[in-house]
């Protein structure tokens, strides 16, 4: 940690503010800017699949706030918050952020904030205990989806099946149906190979949630899902291996 640069991202919905932030970061020799965006949702997606050690982000942004994203990542990486609104400072410190910068931010003030971050990251306790946000296929047990103007966390174990609806996908869980704008193939690649399996061009099911199988039909609760010829062999091979003794 002492010899390597700190991997960081910058997030602000105002282009001029983001530009200022990225310019400051690039001037500091021990920082490595790997991602910059005007959208917190994009930042969240990046945090879920990449190694990041420091996040510099605005508090108030469309769709999702900096405070909300800190709750989602559960304070697993140091965060420097920026905003034009001083009334959010107290709440920021309650979340144990590294520093809180009020706009307009001077380069000198920003340097002090990132120096605090470097000291935290270099401390033995931090190096030993800090968990970097990186959801690999071995550890990831959830995903975040945007629906009805909000971001929702969906645990894989709650999903019964997914249904493709042209440009949309219906995620059917034990308690609700979430409609999201997503490519079906992209969603398939976001799910772990176990227990999920594609059984039709428009359906992915959780093997653990299947109640019964009759011919080429899957029964999950009151839902009847067809198994197409394209996916039939792989599906029956998999359930034979894991669930049935034919």
Image (spheres, rainbow, N blue to C red):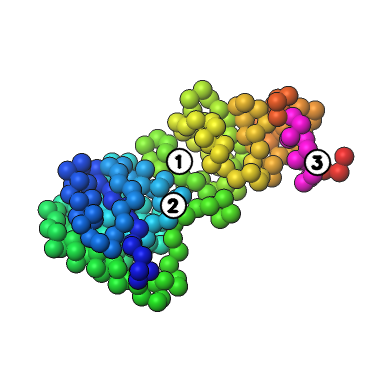
| Residue 175 in picture, x, y percent from top left | 55, 42
Q: Residue at x 41, y 76 (%)?
A: 125
- Magenta segment range? 232-243
Cα gap from disc 2 to disc 1, whole angstroms = 18 Å
Residue at screen point 38% across, 41% down: 150
Residue 145: which disc? 1
Residue at left 28%, top 48%? Answer: 11
Residue 242 placed where, x, y %? 77, 46
Is disc 1 placed on a helix, strand or loop? strand
Q: Main secondary structure of the magenta part?
A: helix
User: What element does badge 3 sit on?
Assistant: helix
Query: Does residue 19 show up magenta in the picture?
Result: no
Q: Which residue is mark 3?
A: 240
Q: Quadrant of residue 73?
A: bottom left
Q: In this figure, which residue is indicated by the disc labeled 2?
A: 50
Callout 3 environment at 10 Å: few (<14), some (14 to 19), or many (20+)?
A: few
């Amino acid at each position: 940690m002492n010899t390597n640069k700190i991997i960081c991202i910058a997030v602000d919905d105002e282009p001029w503010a983001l530009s200022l932030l990225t310019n400051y970061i690039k001037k500091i020799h021990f920082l490595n800017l790997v991602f910059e965006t005007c959208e917190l949702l994009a930042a969240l997606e990046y945090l879920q699949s990449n190694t990041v050690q420091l996040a510099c982000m605005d508090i108030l942004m469309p769709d999702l706030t900096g405070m909300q994203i800190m709750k989602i990542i559960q304070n697993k990486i140091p965060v420097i918050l920026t905003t034009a609104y001083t009334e959010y400072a107290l709440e920021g410190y309650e979340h144990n952020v590294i520093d809180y910068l009020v706009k307009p931010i001077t380069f000198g003030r920003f340097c002090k904030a990132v120096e605090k971050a470097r000291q935290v990251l270099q401390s033995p306790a931090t190096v030993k205990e800090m968990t970097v946000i990186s959801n690999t296929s071995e550890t990831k047990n959830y995903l975040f989806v945007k629906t009805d103007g909000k971001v929702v966390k969906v645990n894989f174990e709650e999903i019964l099946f997914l249904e493709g609806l042209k440009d949309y996908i219906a995620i059917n869980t034990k308690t609700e149906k979430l409609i999201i704008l997503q490519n079906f193939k992209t969603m398939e690649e976001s799910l772990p190979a176990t227990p999920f399996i594609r059984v039709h061009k428009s359906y992915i099911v959780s093997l653990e949630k299947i109640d019964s199988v009759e011919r080429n039909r899957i029964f999950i609760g009151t839902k009847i899902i067809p198994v197409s010829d394209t996916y039939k062999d792989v599906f029956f091979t998999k359930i034979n291996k894991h669930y049935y003794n034919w």
